[in-house]
Amino acid sequence: MPSCALIYCNTRYGTTTGPNCGLFSFPKLNRQEREKWVKFVQSERGEKKWLPSAASKLCSKHFKKDDIYRGKTGRLMLKKGAVPYSREIESANKTRQVCPSCHATLPDSFQATQSRHEQIKSIIAKVYHFLEREYEQLKSLHPETDWSPLSRVRQRAAVATGVSEPDVRDILSEESVGLLVEQKTPNKRARKITTEESSSDNDDDDDDRTSNDDDDSDKQTEDALKLQDFGPETLTTSLKPEAIANNSVNSSAVEVCSDDIVRRDKQTTISQPAPHVHTRDPLMIEVKLEEITIENEGIS
Protein backbone atom coordinates (compact mmCIF):
# COMPACT_ATOMS: atom_id res chain seq x y z
CA MET A 1 0.00 0.00 0.00
CA PRO A 2 1.43 3.41 -0.92
CA SER A 3 2.46 5.76 1.86
CA CYS A 4 3.86 9.24 2.31
CA ALA A 5 7.62 9.65 1.89
CA LEU A 6 7.91 11.64 5.11
CA ILE A 7 8.68 9.65 8.24
CA TYR A 8 6.59 11.73 10.68
CA CYS A 9 3.48 11.60 8.47
CA ASN A 10 0.72 9.32 9.78
CA THR A 11 0.11 7.84 6.32
CA ARG A 12 3.52 6.21 6.48
CA TYR A 13 2.30 3.07 8.16
CA GLY A 14 -0.21 1.94 5.57
CA THR A 15 -3.21 3.89 6.85
CA THR A 16 -5.97 4.67 4.38
CA THR A 17 -5.98 8.14 2.89
CA GLY A 18 -9.71 8.76 3.12
CA PRO A 19 -11.82 11.15 1.02
CA ASN A 20 -10.00 14.26 2.24
CA CYS A 21 -6.45 13.01 1.76
CA GLY A 22 -4.64 11.97 -1.41
CA LEU A 23 -1.21 10.71 -2.47
CA PHE A 24 0.69 12.27 -5.35
CA SER A 25 3.66 10.86 -7.27
CA PHE A 26 6.85 12.83 -7.82
CA PRO A 27 7.00 14.79 -11.09
CA LYS A 28 8.79 12.92 -13.86
CA LEU A 29 8.79 15.32 -16.81
CA ASN A 30 9.56 18.63 -15.09
CA ARG A 31 13.02 18.28 -13.54
CA GLN A 32 12.91 21.59 -11.67
CA GLU A 33 9.71 20.64 -9.86
CA ARG A 34 11.12 17.20 -9.12
CA GLU A 35 14.26 18.73 -7.57
CA LYS A 36 12.10 20.96 -5.36
CA TRP A 37 10.13 17.93 -4.18
CA VAL A 38 13.32 16.00 -3.45
CA LYS A 39 14.92 18.88 -1.52
CA PHE A 40 11.76 19.27 0.52
CA VAL A 41 11.76 15.62 1.56
CA GLN A 42 15.51 15.68 2.29
CA SER A 43 15.10 18.71 4.57
CA GLU A 44 12.08 17.21 6.34
CA ARG A 45 13.70 13.79 6.81
CA GLY A 46 17.13 15.20 7.61
CA GLU A 47 18.75 13.01 4.98
CA LYS A 48 20.68 14.92 2.34
CA LYS A 49 21.39 11.78 0.25
CA TRP A 50 17.78 10.63 0.09
CA LEU A 51 16.45 10.01 -3.43
CA PRO A 52 12.88 9.06 -4.40
CA SER A 53 11.94 5.77 -5.98
CA ALA A 54 9.24 5.05 -8.53
CA ALA A 55 6.78 4.34 -5.72
CA SER A 56 7.63 7.41 -3.61
CA LYS A 57 4.69 9.71 -2.99
CA LEU A 58 3.68 12.75 -0.93
CA CYS A 59 0.27 13.16 0.64
CA SER A 60 -1.97 16.20 0.30
CA LYS A 61 -1.19 17.32 3.88
CA HIS A 62 2.13 18.78 2.66
CA PHE A 63 0.63 21.05 0.00
CA LYS A 64 -1.34 24.25 0.16
CA LYS A 65 -5.09 23.98 -0.03
CA ASP A 66 -5.15 26.24 -3.08
CA ASP A 67 -2.96 23.74 -4.99
CA ILE A 68 -5.42 20.87 -4.47
CA TYR A 69 -8.75 20.40 -6.20
CA ARG A 70 -11.25 17.60 -6.64
CA GLY A 71 -11.58 16.02 -10.08
CA LYS A 72 -14.64 14.71 -11.92
CA THR A 73 -14.35 11.30 -10.30
CA GLY A 74 -14.16 12.85 -6.81
CA ARG A 75 -10.49 12.16 -6.31
CA LEU A 76 -8.13 14.85 -5.09
CA MET A 77 -5.94 16.23 -7.86
CA LEU A 78 -2.80 18.41 -7.73
CA LYS A 79 -2.35 21.50 -9.85
CA LYS A 80 0.60 21.77 -12.21
CA GLY A 81 3.63 23.50 -10.75
CA ALA A 82 2.57 22.79 -7.15
CA VAL A 83 5.43 22.54 -4.68
CA PRO A 84 5.24 20.86 -1.24
CA TYR A 85 4.84 23.26 1.65
CA SER A 86 6.12 22.93 5.21
CA ARG A 87 3.41 22.91 7.88
CA GLU A 88 5.79 24.50 10.40
CA ILE A 89 6.13 27.60 8.22
CA GLU A 90 2.36 27.75 7.83
CA SER A 91 1.80 27.52 11.59
CA ALA A 92 4.39 30.27 12.16
CA ASN A 93 2.60 32.53 9.70
CA LYS A 94 -0.69 31.86 11.41
CA THR A 95 0.69 32.90 14.77
CA ARG A 96 2.10 36.08 13.26
CA GLN A 97 -1.26 36.98 11.76
CA VAL A 98 -3.00 36.87 15.14
CA CYS A 99 -4.11 40.33 16.17
CA PRO A 100 -2.58 41.28 19.55
CA SER A 101 -5.62 43.35 20.54
CA CYS A 102 -7.85 40.28 20.19
CA HIS A 103 -6.01 38.59 23.07
CA ALA A 104 -5.21 41.65 25.15
CA THR A 105 -7.08 40.44 28.23
CA LEU A 106 -5.38 37.45 29.80
CA PRO A 107 -7.43 34.83 31.62
CA ASP A 108 -7.49 34.71 35.39
CA SER A 109 -5.65 31.40 35.41
CA PHE A 110 -2.72 32.92 33.53
CA GLN A 111 -2.59 35.90 35.88
CA ALA A 112 -2.71 33.53 38.85
CA THR A 113 0.21 31.54 37.49
CA GLN A 114 2.15 34.75 36.88
CA SER A 115 1.62 35.91 40.46
CA ARG A 116 2.60 32.44 41.68
CA HIS A 117 5.82 32.61 39.67
CA GLU A 118 6.63 35.97 41.25
CA GLN A 119 6.05 34.52 44.72
CA ILE A 120 8.33 31.57 43.95
CA LYS A 121 11.05 33.93 42.71
CA SER A 122 10.85 36.01 45.88
CA ILE A 123 11.09 32.86 48.04
CA ILE A 124 14.17 31.65 46.15
CA ALA A 125 15.82 35.07 46.58
CA LYS A 126 15.04 35.04 50.32
CA VAL A 127 16.56 31.56 50.69
CA TYR A 128 19.72 32.72 48.90
CA HIS A 129 20.08 35.80 51.12
CA PHE A 130 19.46 33.71 54.25
CA LEU A 131 22.19 31.23 53.34
CA GLU A 132 24.54 34.08 52.46
CA ARG A 133 23.99 35.79 55.84
CA GLU A 134 24.44 32.48 57.62
CA TYR A 135 27.77 31.89 55.90
CA GLU A 136 29.02 35.39 56.75
CA GLN A 137 27.97 35.08 60.41
CA LEU A 138 29.68 31.72 60.82
CA LYS A 139 32.87 33.11 59.30
CA SER A 140 32.86 36.10 61.66
CA LEU A 141 32.02 34.07 64.80
CA HIS A 142 34.38 31.16 64.15
CA PRO A 143 37.18 32.33 61.86
CA GLU A 144 39.36 29.36 62.80
CA THR A 145 36.90 26.91 61.20
CA ASP A 146 36.96 26.10 57.50
CA TRP A 147 33.56 27.12 56.09
CA SER A 148 34.51 26.77 52.43
CA PRO A 149 31.86 24.06 51.75
CA LEU A 150 29.22 26.64 52.63
CA SER A 151 30.68 29.32 50.35
CA ARG A 152 28.77 28.03 47.32
CA VAL A 153 25.63 29.89 48.32
CA ARG A 154 24.06 29.86 44.87
CA GLN A 155 24.40 26.10 44.54
CA ARG A 156 23.01 25.57 48.04
CA ALA A 157 20.02 27.80 47.27
CA ALA A 158 19.34 25.87 44.07
CA VAL A 159 19.42 22.54 45.94
CA ALA A 160 17.24 23.87 48.75
CA THR A 161 14.56 25.27 46.43
CA GLY A 162 14.66 22.53 43.78
CA VAL A 163 15.66 24.74 40.84
CA SER A 164 18.77 24.99 38.71
CA GLU A 165 21.69 27.23 39.54
CA PRO A 166 21.24 29.41 36.40
CA ASP A 167 17.65 30.03 37.47
CA VAL A 168 18.88 31.33 40.83
CA ARG A 169 21.36 33.57 39.02
CA ASP A 170 18.64 34.99 36.76
CA ILE A 171 16.35 35.64 39.72
CA LEU A 172 19.09 37.49 41.58
CA SER A 173 19.91 39.59 38.52
CA GLU A 174 16.23 40.54 38.14
CA GLU A 175 16.12 41.49 41.80
CA SER A 176 19.22 43.68 41.49
CA VAL A 177 17.75 45.44 38.45
CA GLY A 178 14.55 46.13 40.39
CA LEU A 179 16.52 47.59 43.29
CA LEU A 180 18.46 49.86 40.95
CA VAL A 181 15.23 51.16 39.44
CA GLU A 182 13.80 51.85 42.91
CA GLN A 183 16.96 53.73 43.90
CA LYS A 184 16.91 55.92 40.81
CA THR A 185 13.33 57.15 41.24
CA PRO A 186 13.92 59.15 44.50
CA ASN A 187 16.81 61.02 42.87
CA LYS A 188 14.48 62.21 40.16
CA ARG A 189 12.02 63.41 42.78
CA ALA A 190 14.81 65.23 44.62
CA ARG A 191 15.81 66.95 41.42
CA LYS A 192 12.24 68.09 40.91
CA ILE A 193 12.11 69.44 44.46
CA THR A 194 15.37 71.36 44.02
CA THR A 195 14.15 72.88 40.78
CA GLU A 196 10.90 73.91 42.45
CA GLU A 197 12.82 75.47 45.36
CA SER A 198 15.10 77.37 43.00
CA SER A 199 12.09 78.66 41.10
CA SER A 200 10.45 79.72 44.38
CA ASP A 201 13.67 81.49 45.42
CA ASN A 202 13.72 83.32 42.13
CA ASP A 203 10.10 84.33 42.68
CA ASP A 204 10.99 85.63 46.17
CA ASP A 205 13.86 87.63 44.70
CA ASP A 206 11.52 89.10 42.15
CA ASP A 207 9.05 89.99 44.92
CA ASP A 208 11.82 91.66 46.92
CA ARG A 209 12.87 93.63 43.88
CA THR A 210 9.31 94.77 43.25
CA SER A 211 8.87 95.74 46.92
CA ASN A 212 12.10 97.74 46.80
CA ASP A 213 10.90 99.45 43.68
CA ASP A 214 7.64 100.30 45.44
CA ASP A 215 9.58 101.75 48.40
CA ASP A 216 11.68 103.86 46.05
CA SER A 217 8.57 105.15 44.33
CA ASP A 218 7.01 106.03 47.71
CA LYS A 219 10.14 107.94 48.70
CA GLN A 220 10.08 109.85 45.43
CA THR A 221 6.44 110.83 45.93
CA GLU A 222 7.17 111.99 49.50
CA ASP A 223 10.08 114.14 48.29
CA ALA A 224 7.88 115.63 45.62
CA LEU A 225 5.23 116.47 48.19
CA LYS A 226 7.84 118.17 50.39
CA LEU A 227 9.06 120.34 47.55
CA GLN A 228 5.58 121.55 46.69
CA ASP A 229 4.78 124.99 48.18
CA PHE A 230 1.22 125.16 49.34
CA GLY A 231 -0.26 128.59 49.86
CA PRO A 232 -1.61 129.90 53.18
CA GLU A 233 -4.48 127.87 54.39
CA THR A 234 -7.65 129.34 55.80
CA LEU A 235 -9.72 127.32 58.18
CA THR A 236 -13.39 128.11 58.58
CA THR A 237 -15.15 126.85 61.67
CA SER A 238 -18.76 127.25 62.63
CA LEU A 239 -19.67 126.88 66.27
CA LYS A 240 -23.06 126.56 67.87
CA PRO A 241 -24.17 129.09 70.51
CA GLU A 242 -23.48 126.71 73.36
CA ALA A 243 -19.98 126.02 72.04
CA ILE A 244 -19.27 129.75 71.73
CA ALA A 245 -20.42 130.40 75.28
CA ASN A 246 -18.32 127.58 76.63
CA ASN A 247 -15.29 128.79 74.69
CA SER A 248 -15.68 132.35 76.03
CA VAL A 249 -16.02 131.11 79.61
CA ASN A 250 -13.00 128.87 79.25
CA SER A 251 -10.94 131.69 77.79
CA SER A 252 -11.90 133.99 80.66
CA ALA A 253 -10.95 131.32 83.18
CA VAL A 254 -7.58 130.91 81.50
CA GLU A 255 -7.06 134.68 81.68
CA VAL A 256 -7.98 134.71 85.38
CA CYS A 257 -5.45 131.98 86.11
CA SER A 258 -2.74 133.84 84.24
CA ASP A 259 -3.62 137.10 86.07
CA ASP A 260 -3.46 135.29 89.37
CA ILE A 261 0.04 134.10 88.59
CA VAL A 262 1.14 137.61 87.67
CA ARG A 263 -0.42 138.98 90.88
CA ARG A 264 1.45 136.56 93.04
CA ASP A 265 4.74 137.38 91.35
CA LYS A 266 4.46 141.14 91.27
CA GLN A 267 1.90 141.62 94.04
CA THR A 268 -0.08 143.99 91.90
CA THR A 269 -3.72 144.39 91.29
CA ILE A 270 -4.82 143.70 87.74
CA SER A 271 -8.26 144.46 86.55
CA GLN A 272 -9.16 143.17 83.17
CA PRO A 273 -12.57 143.53 81.67
CA ALA A 274 -14.00 140.46 80.07
CA PRO A 275 -15.01 140.71 76.48
CA HIS A 276 -18.67 140.99 75.54
CA VAL A 277 -19.82 138.51 72.86
CA HIS A 278 -22.80 139.55 70.80
CA THR A 279 -24.34 137.49 68.02
CA ARG A 280 -26.70 138.53 65.33
CA ASP A 281 -28.41 135.15 65.24
CA PRO A 282 -31.50 135.15 67.51
CA LEU A 283 -30.63 131.59 68.52
CA MET A 284 -27.24 132.69 69.77
CA ILE A 285 -27.00 133.39 73.47
CA GLU A 286 -25.64 136.74 74.59
CA VAL A 287 -22.97 136.20 77.08
CA LYS A 288 -21.97 139.11 79.26
CA LEU A 289 -19.19 138.81 81.66
CA GLU A 290 -18.69 141.36 84.38
CA GLU A 291 -15.42 142.85 85.25
CA ILE A 292 -13.26 140.70 87.39
CA THR A 293 -11.29 142.54 89.99
CA ILE A 294 -8.26 140.79 91.21
CA GLU A 295 -6.90 142.02 94.47
CA ASN A 296 -4.00 140.97 96.58
CA GLU A 297 -6.04 138.69 98.82
CA GLY A 298 -8.23 136.97 96.32
CA ILE A 299 -10.73 137.13 93.50
CA SER A 300 -14.14 138.91 93.87
Image: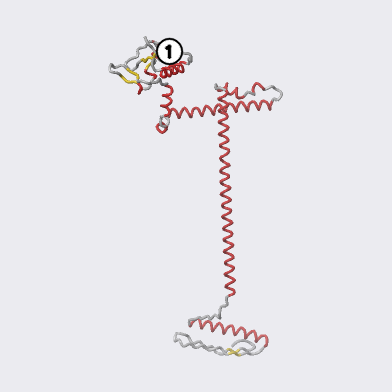
Q: Is 24 situated above or below 92?
A: above
Report x, y in % for residue 218: 57, 67
- Residue type at mark 1 is Pro
Report x, y in % for residue 139: 68, 26
Q: Is 95 situated above or below 45?
A: below
Task: Quickly name the residue at label 1.
Answer: 52
- Residue at the top extreme of this rendering: 1
Which quadrant of the view contains residue 110?
top left
Which quadrant of the view contains residue 297?
bottom right
Image quadrant where one finds the C terminus: bottom right
Kindly identify the residue that appears in the image at 65 percent across and 21 percent down: 149
Image quadrant where one finds the N terminus: top left
209 or 134, which is in the foreground? 209
Q: Is 3 situated above or below 216?
A: above
- Circle 1 — which element? loop
109 or 242, which is in the foreground? 109
From the viewer's perspective, is 134 left or right of 61? right
Kindly identify the residue that appears in the image at 59 percent across and 26 percent down: 128
Kindly identify the residue that appears in the image at 45 percent across and 85 percent down: 283
Kindly identify the residue that appears in the image at 30 percent across and 18 percent down: 71
199 or 159, which is in the foreground? 199
